[in-house]
Amino acid sequence: MENYQQDNIPYHLILDEMERVLSPAEAIALEQWKDASPENLTFYNTVRNAGDRLTLLNLYKTADVDNAWSRMSASVQREQEQPQVGRKGNLLLLFGALAAAVITGVSIILFNWFSTGETIYHTANERRQIVLPDGSHVFLNERSAISYIRRSFHQKRQVKLLEGEAYFEVVHDDKNEFLVELGAIVVRDIGTSFDIKIDTGNIQVIVNDGAVSMEHQQPAANLQKVVLTANQMALFNRNTKSISYDAAAPLNYKAWQDKKLRYVQTPLSMVCRDLNRIYGTRVVFQDTALAEKKLNAYLNQKTEDQIMHIIAASLQLKIVKKDSTFIISR
């Protein structure tokens, strides 16, 4: 289940509970989050009892709340002028507050609940874990977004990866396949965990366990499809509209999610590139030749300071941290 923190509040579960559409797996996840700390329970009770948008806005103390509220108020004024009845009206008030919180820079859940039932998760400078209605887990990287239709998810298990990168741990169901849509590309789960990444030129799929198929949806005569098993990778070139296959996936493709890094005779330049991608680490080499030194190491959930200490000891280098930059010298 999700290990919710104060900056990772399960609004979707609270709102589903209020709408009485919470699944058994989601009910357990919500109870575990409430039991995790007294602060969580207090926050839960506050949200359940919130009577207007400002109650929730006050939970997000930011420097620009007033500006966010003025920008949001125009778009919700029509809702205020129309009579709202009972629970649905209260939830619309909550949604307005959540949307205003997003404007202020808080990356949480956006809802288009009453029109389509679509739930959208978007991250800014943080990563988050999401439990889908069927119990499957999605780990969302920074600057990434997914969406799905919550109300019909048990009938049609379909997620859209809108941008960025996500790691999926899917609960397999022989009678109800799990799909990830990426425009013309569809990834079908065959009982597995896998990573999908969208960048400017490519869509990358890497299988951690089990198998998936990657398909380019085009006229049947030209259908492109590749089936991947553990540690295999496929790339869809968005310019040429072609799928390529690699039997050996990059070693540290999911280190952003599990913080496990493995290096075998790896140039220090590549190590530092990984650290920048995962931790935002900035490194300066006083001698460019040092970037070619080879590292052998297994780094399991280390901090960037710990990693730099290991590099210095392993390669007999001097590493000094100045402000937020590590300077590497002999």
Image (spheres, rainbow, N blue to C red):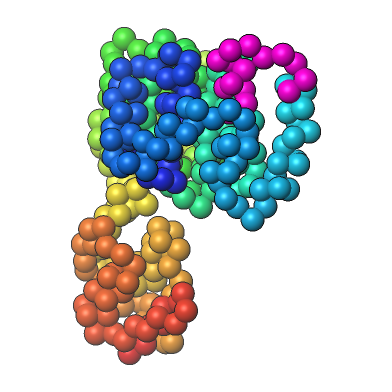
The residue sitting at 27% across, 76% down in the picture is: 309
**Quick check: is 305 in the magenta stretch?**
no
Where is residue 236? Give x, y as percent: 49, 38
Where is residue 3? Give x, y as percent: 31, 40
Query: Is residue 285 something that shows in the picture?
Result: no
Where is residue 63? Give x, y as percent: 64, 55
The residue sitting at 43% across, 42% down in the picture is: 8
The residue sitting at 44% across, 26% down in the picture is: 14
Say above or below: 239 vs 170.
below
Task: Give 106 or 251, whichever is nearer the viewer.
Answer: 106
Query: Is residue 263 something that shows in the picture?
Result: yes
Q: Residue furthest bottom?
A: 330
Look at the image and give the residue range highlighted in magenta. 80-94
Where is residue 147? Give x, y as percent: 52, 28
The reply, left or right, for residue 329 in relation to residue 97 is: left
Say above or below: 140 vs 251.
above
Tell me which corner region of the image, top left, top right, bottom left or bottom right, holds residue 277: bottom left
The reply, left or right, for residue 261 in relation to residue 20 is: left
Question: The C terminus appears in which quarter of the rendering?
Answer: bottom left
The reply, left or right, for residue 241 in relation to residue 26 is: right
Magenta stretch: dominant secondary structure: helix
